[in-house]
Amino acid sequence: MSEQTIALVTGANKGIGFEIAAGLGALGWSVGVGARDDERRESAVEKLRSAGADAFGVPLDVTDDASVAAAARLIEERAGRLDVLVNNAAITGGMPQTPTTVDPGTMRATVETNVIGVIRVTNAMLPLLRRSASPRIVNMSSSVGSLTRQTAPGAETGPISAAYAPSKTFLNAVTVQYAKELSDTNILINAGCPGFCATDLNGFRGVRTPEQGAAIAIKLATLPDDGPTGGFFDDAGPIPW
Ligand SMILES: NC(=O)c1ccc[n+]([C@@H]2O[C@H](COP(=O)([O-])OP(=O)(O)OC[C@H]3O[C@@H](n4cnc5c(N)ncnc54)[C@H](OP(=O)(O)O)[C@@H]3O)[C@@H](O)[C@H]2O)c1
Protein backbone atom coordinates (compact mmCIF):
# COMPACT_ATOMS: atom_id res chain seq x y z
CA MET A 1 0.00 0.00 0.00
CA SER A 2 1.16 3.52 -0.84
CA GLU A 3 2.59 5.71 1.92
CA GLN A 4 0.95 8.72 0.32
CA THR A 5 -2.04 9.96 2.33
CA ILE A 6 -5.33 9.19 0.53
CA ALA A 7 -8.34 11.49 0.95
CA LEU A 8 -11.84 11.65 -0.46
CA VAL A 9 -13.80 14.91 -0.58
CA THR A 10 -17.49 14.72 -1.47
CA GLY A 11 -18.97 17.52 -3.57
CA ALA A 12 -15.46 18.53 -4.63
CA ASN A 13 -16.26 19.79 -8.11
CA LYS A 14 -16.83 23.38 -6.96
CA GLY A 15 -17.05 25.78 -4.04
CA ILE A 16 -15.52 24.92 -0.69
CA GLY A 17 -15.16 21.22 -1.58
CA PHE A 18 -12.97 22.07 -4.56
CA GLU A 19 -10.77 24.24 -2.34
CA ILE A 20 -10.54 21.49 0.28
CA ALA A 21 -9.35 19.12 -2.46
CA ALA A 22 -6.85 21.76 -3.64
CA GLY A 23 -5.58 22.31 -0.10
CA LEU A 24 -5.14 18.60 0.61
CA GLY A 25 -3.54 18.14 -2.82
CA ALA A 26 -1.05 20.89 -1.95
CA LEU A 27 0.04 18.77 1.03
CA GLY A 28 1.15 16.11 -1.45
CA TRP A 29 -1.85 13.90 -0.74
CA SER A 30 -3.71 11.84 -3.29
CA VAL A 31 -7.19 13.35 -3.41
CA GLY A 32 -10.36 11.73 -4.67
CA VAL A 33 -12.69 14.33 -6.17
CA GLY A 34 -16.15 13.01 -5.33
CA ALA A 35 -18.74 14.48 -7.68
CA ARG A 36 -21.96 13.30 -9.27
CA ASP A 37 -21.67 15.00 -12.66
CA ASP A 38 -19.09 13.52 -15.04
CA GLU A 39 -18.21 16.75 -16.82
CA ARG A 40 -18.00 18.89 -13.67
CA ARG A 41 -15.91 16.21 -11.95
CA GLU A 42 -13.45 15.77 -14.81
CA SER A 43 -13.00 19.51 -15.25
CA ALA A 44 -12.27 19.88 -11.51
CA VAL A 45 -9.78 16.99 -11.62
CA GLU A 46 -8.11 18.58 -14.65
CA LYS A 47 -7.85 21.94 -12.86
CA LEU A 48 -6.41 20.36 -9.72
CA ARG A 49 -3.90 18.33 -11.71
CA SER A 50 -2.74 21.39 -13.66
CA ALA A 51 -2.07 23.03 -10.29
CA GLY A 52 0.16 20.05 -9.41
CA ALA A 53 -2.26 18.06 -7.22
CA ASP A 54 -2.46 14.27 -7.40
CA ALA A 55 -6.24 14.31 -7.95
CA PHE A 56 -8.44 11.53 -9.27
CA GLY A 57 -12.12 11.46 -10.09
CA VAL A 58 -14.61 9.51 -7.96
CA PRO A 59 -18.13 9.32 -9.43
CA LEU A 60 -20.28 9.87 -6.38
CA ASP A 61 -23.88 10.79 -5.67
CA VAL A 62 -24.21 10.74 -1.88
CA THR A 63 -27.95 9.97 -2.12
CA ASP A 64 -27.41 6.80 -4.14
CA ASP A 65 -26.44 3.50 -2.44
CA ALA A 66 -25.01 1.96 -5.62
CA SER A 67 -22.97 5.06 -6.45
CA VAL A 68 -21.50 5.20 -2.94
CA ALA A 69 -20.68 1.47 -2.96
CA ALA A 70 -18.97 1.87 -6.34
CA ALA A 71 -16.96 4.83 -4.98
CA ALA A 72 -15.72 2.67 -2.09
CA ARG A 73 -14.72 -0.07 -4.56
CA LEU A 74 -12.87 2.46 -6.71
CA ILE A 75 -10.83 3.71 -3.74
CA GLU A 76 -10.16 0.17 -2.51
CA GLU A 77 -8.85 -0.83 -5.95
CA ARG A 78 -6.78 2.33 -6.31
CA ALA A 79 -5.33 2.70 -2.82
CA GLY A 80 -6.43 -0.21 -0.64
CA ARG A 81 -7.38 2.17 2.16
CA LEU A 82 -8.64 5.67 2.95
CA ASP A 83 -6.97 8.04 5.42
CA VAL A 84 -9.29 11.04 5.34
CA LEU A 85 -12.94 11.45 4.41
CA VAL A 86 -14.38 14.95 4.08
CA ASN A 87 -18.17 14.87 3.91
CA ASN A 88 -18.67 18.22 2.22
CA ALA A 89 -21.53 17.73 -0.27
CA ALA A 90 -24.76 19.45 0.74
CA ILE A 91 -27.78 21.30 -0.59
CA THR A 92 -29.90 24.04 0.95
CA GLY A 93 -33.13 22.69 -0.47
CA GLY A 94 -33.88 26.16 -1.88
CA MET A 95 -34.91 29.37 -0.15
CA PRO A 96 -37.18 30.80 1.20
CA GLN A 97 -37.84 27.89 3.47
CA THR A 98 -40.20 28.73 6.29
CA PRO A 99 -41.36 25.97 8.68
CA THR A 100 -45.03 26.93 8.23
CA THR A 101 -44.94 26.51 4.44
CA VAL A 102 -42.11 24.09 3.71
CA ASP A 103 -42.77 21.27 1.31
CA PRO A 104 -42.18 17.84 2.90
CA GLY A 105 -40.24 16.91 -0.25
CA THR A 106 -37.77 19.72 0.48
CA MET A 107 -37.32 18.41 4.02
CA ARG A 108 -36.72 14.87 2.78
CA ALA A 109 -34.31 15.86 0.01
CA THR A 110 -32.26 18.08 2.31
CA VAL A 111 -31.96 15.48 5.06
CA GLU A 112 -31.28 12.77 2.47
CA THR A 113 -28.25 14.67 1.14
CA ASN A 114 -26.95 16.52 4.20
CA VAL A 115 -27.44 13.83 6.84
CA ILE A 116 -28.26 10.41 5.41
CA GLY A 117 -25.79 11.05 2.58
CA VAL A 118 -23.04 11.60 5.16
CA ILE A 119 -23.99 8.40 7.00
CA ARG A 120 -24.18 6.44 3.74
CA VAL A 121 -20.73 7.60 2.58
CA THR A 122 -19.12 7.29 6.01
CA ASN A 123 -20.33 3.73 6.55
CA ALA A 124 -19.26 2.67 3.06
CA MET A 125 -15.79 4.14 3.62
CA LEU A 126 -15.31 2.95 7.22
CA PRO A 127 -13.75 -0.42 6.29
CA LEU A 128 -11.15 1.50 4.25
CA LEU A 129 -10.64 4.12 6.97
CA ARG A 130 -10.06 1.39 9.56
CA ARG A 131 -6.99 0.33 7.53
CA SER A 132 -5.39 3.76 7.98
CA ALA A 133 -2.84 4.57 10.70
CA SER A 134 -4.53 7.94 11.44
CA PRO A 135 -8.06 8.06 10.04
CA ARG A 136 -9.94 11.36 10.08
CA ILE A 137 -13.54 12.15 9.18
CA VAL A 138 -14.59 15.76 8.68
CA ASN A 139 -18.27 16.62 8.40
CA MET A 140 -18.85 20.02 6.85
CA SER A 141 -21.56 21.52 8.98
CA SER A 142 -22.61 25.12 9.57
CA SER A 143 -22.91 27.42 12.54
CA VAL A 144 -26.58 27.83 11.51
CA GLY A 145 -26.97 24.32 12.94
CA SER A 146 -25.94 25.59 16.37
CA LEU A 147 -29.10 25.82 18.50
CA THR A 148 -27.18 27.95 21.00
CA ARG A 149 -26.42 30.51 18.29
CA GLN A 150 -29.90 30.29 16.73
CA THR A 151 -31.47 31.18 20.07
CA ALA A 152 -28.96 33.78 21.27
CA PRO A 153 -30.76 37.12 21.60
CA GLY A 154 -29.71 39.58 18.89
CA ALA A 155 -27.35 37.13 17.19
CA GLU A 156 -26.93 37.08 13.39
CA THR A 157 -28.47 33.67 12.64
CA GLY A 158 -29.06 33.67 8.87
CA PRO A 159 -32.47 33.30 7.21
CA ILE A 160 -35.29 31.27 8.75
CA SER A 161 -34.66 27.79 7.45
CA ALA A 162 -36.90 24.79 7.99
CA ALA A 163 -34.67 22.23 6.30
CA TYR A 164 -31.08 23.43 5.83
CA ALA A 165 -30.22 24.72 9.34
CA PRO A 166 -31.95 21.78 11.11
CA SER A 167 -30.17 19.36 8.75
CA LYS A 168 -26.87 20.71 10.08
CA THR A 169 -28.10 20.39 13.69
CA PHE A 170 -29.00 16.77 12.85
CA LEU A 171 -25.56 16.26 11.25
CA ASN A 172 -23.87 17.63 14.37
CA ALA A 173 -25.86 15.23 16.54
CA VAL A 174 -24.93 12.32 14.29
CA THR A 175 -21.25 13.36 14.43
CA VAL A 176 -21.37 13.13 18.24
CA GLN A 177 -22.89 9.64 18.09
CA TYR A 178 -20.19 8.46 15.65
CA ALA A 179 -17.52 9.85 17.96
CA LYS A 180 -19.07 7.94 20.87
CA GLU A 181 -19.19 4.67 18.94
CA LEU A 182 -15.66 5.11 17.55
CA SER A 183 -14.13 6.35 20.82
CA ASP A 184 -12.07 3.19 21.27
CA THR A 185 -10.60 3.45 17.75
CA ASN A 186 -7.98 5.79 16.26
CA ILE A 187 -10.65 7.48 14.10
CA LEU A 188 -11.21 11.18 14.85
CA ILE A 189 -14.51 12.60 13.59
CA ASN A 190 -15.44 16.27 13.87
CA ALA A 191 -17.82 18.81 12.40
CA GLY A 192 -16.52 22.05 10.91
CA CYS A 193 -18.07 25.34 9.84
CA PRO A 194 -16.42 27.22 6.96
CA GLY A 195 -18.04 30.58 7.72
CA PHE A 196 -20.18 32.51 5.24
CA CYS A 197 -18.40 31.94 1.92
CA ALA A 198 -19.29 33.13 -1.57
CA THR A 199 -20.45 29.97 -3.38
CA ASP A 200 -23.36 28.69 -5.46
CA LEU A 201 -25.02 27.58 -2.21
CA ASN A 202 -25.89 31.17 -1.27
CA GLY A 203 -25.87 32.88 -4.68
CA PHE A 204 -22.29 34.01 -4.00
CA ARG A 205 -23.44 36.37 -1.24
CA GLY A 206 -20.90 35.06 1.29
CA VAL A 207 -18.20 37.38 2.57
CA ARG A 208 -15.37 34.83 2.78
CA THR A 209 -13.66 33.06 -0.10
CA PRO A 210 -14.18 29.30 -0.61
CA GLU A 211 -10.46 28.94 0.05
CA GLN A 212 -10.89 30.57 3.47
CA GLY A 213 -13.84 28.24 4.09
CA ALA A 214 -11.70 25.20 3.26
CA ALA A 215 -9.18 26.02 6.01
CA ILE A 216 -11.16 24.48 8.89
CA ALA A 217 -11.69 21.24 6.93
CA ILE A 218 -7.97 21.04 6.20
CA LYS A 219 -7.20 21.64 9.88
CA LEU A 220 -9.60 18.88 10.99
CA ALA A 221 -8.29 16.56 8.25
CA THR A 222 -4.73 16.95 9.54
CA LEU A 223 -5.36 16.68 13.29
CA PRO A 224 -2.63 14.97 15.31
CA ASP A 225 -3.42 11.58 16.84
CA ASP A 226 -4.22 13.23 20.19
CA GLY A 227 -6.55 15.74 18.53
CA PRO A 228 -10.20 16.23 19.44
CA THR A 229 -13.08 14.03 18.33
CA GLY A 230 -16.83 14.64 18.47
CA GLY A 231 -16.35 18.43 18.34
CA PHE A 232 -17.69 21.32 16.28
CA PHE A 233 -15.19 23.96 15.18
CA ASP A 234 -14.60 26.97 13.00
CA ASP A 235 -11.42 29.00 12.49
CA ALA A 236 -11.93 30.71 15.86
CA GLY A 237 -12.22 27.43 17.83
CA PRO A 238 -15.09 25.37 19.27
CA ILE A 239 -18.67 26.35 18.30
CA PRO A 240 -21.41 25.80 20.90
CA TRP A 241 -23.94 23.09 19.97
N1 LIG B 1 -21.00 28.58 1.51
C1 LIG B 1 -21.23 28.86 2.80
O1 LIG B 1 -21.33 30.03 3.22
C2 LIG B 1 -21.36 27.73 3.79
C3 LIG B 1 -21.57 28.07 5.14
C4 LIG B 1 -21.68 27.06 6.09
C5 LIG B 1 -21.55 25.74 5.68
N2 LIG B 1 -21.35 25.43 4.36
C6 LIG B 1 -21.22 24.02 4.01
O2 LIG B 1 -20.03 23.82 3.27
C7 LIG B 1 -20.20 22.73 2.35
C8 LIG B 1 -19.85 23.17 0.94
O3 LIG B 1 -20.75 24.17 0.55
P1 LIG B 1 -20.51 25.17 -0.69
O4 LIG B 1 -20.87 26.51 -0.20
O5 LIG B 1 -19.18 24.92 -1.30
O6 LIG B 1 -21.69 24.68 -1.67
P2 LIG B 1 -21.77 24.52 -3.24
O7 LIG B 1 -20.84 25.45 -3.95
O8 LIG B 1 -23.21 24.56 -3.57
O9 LIG B 1 -21.21 23.04 -3.46
C9 LIG B 1 -21.91 21.94 -2.98
C10 LIG B 1 -21.28 20.69 -3.55
O10 LIG B 1 -22.05 19.56 -3.10
C11 LIG B 1 -22.35 18.77 -4.23
N3 LIG B 1 -23.53 17.95 -4.05
C12 LIG B 1 -24.80 18.32 -3.75
N4 LIG B 1 -25.61 17.25 -3.70
C13 LIG B 1 -24.82 16.17 -3.98
C14 LIG B 1 -25.07 14.78 -4.10
N5 LIG B 1 -26.30 14.26 -3.93
N6 LIG B 1 -24.03 13.96 -4.35
C15 LIG B 1 -22.78 14.47 -4.54
N7 LIG B 1 -22.49 15.78 -4.48
C16 LIG B 1 -23.51 16.61 -4.21
C17 LIG B 1 -22.48 19.77 -5.38
O11 LIG B 1 -22.41 19.11 -6.63
P3 LIG B 1 -23.17 19.65 -7.96
O12 LIG B 1 -22.25 20.65 -8.59
O13 LIG B 1 -23.33 18.40 -8.77
O14 LIG B 1 -24.47 20.23 -7.52
C18 LIG B 1 -21.28 20.65 -5.08
O15 LIG B 1 -20.11 20.04 -5.54
C19 LIG B 1 -21.65 22.28 2.52
O16 LIG B 1 -21.70 21.20 3.43
C20 LIG B 1 -22.32 23.50 3.11
O17 LIG B 1 -23.50 23.19 3.84
C21 LIG B 1 -21.26 26.40 3.42
Image (spheres, rainbow, N blue to C red):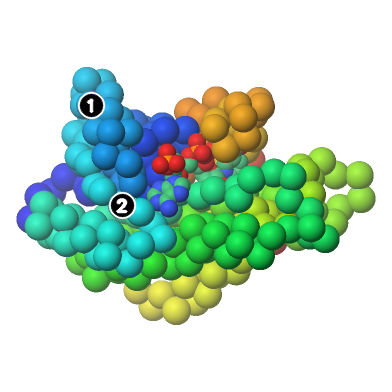
Mark 2 → mark 1, Cα distance in angstroms: 17 Å
Image quarter in which the C terminus is found: bottom right
Instruction: Please state if 71 lies on the left or on the right of 197 as rendered.
Output: left
- 221 or 105, which is in the foreground? 105
Find residue 120 and report its horizontal and vertical position in percent.
39, 67
Task: Answer yes or no: disc 2 within 8 Å of ligand 1.
Answer: yes
Find residue 30 and report its horizontal and vertical position in percent.
21, 41
Q: Is residue 44 above or below residue 184?
A: above
Q: Which amino acid does label 2 sit on?
A: Leu
Q: Residue 60 carries which label?
A: 2
| Residue 110 shows in this picture | yes
Instruction: Please state if 220 lies on the left or on the right of 42 as rendered.
Output: right
Find residue 70 and report its horizontal and vertical position in percent.
21, 60
Image quarter in which the N terminus is found: bottom left
Element type at marker 1? helix
| Residue 7 shows in this picture | no
Q: In this view, does 210 lie above or below 103?
A: above
Q: Which mark is residue 46?
A: 1
Q: What residue type is labelled 1?
A: Glu
Instruction: Please state if 128 lies on the left or on the right of 206 as rendered.
Output: left
Find residue 130 and report its horizontal and vertical position in percent.
25, 69
**Which residue appears at 27% of the width and 28% of the height?**
43
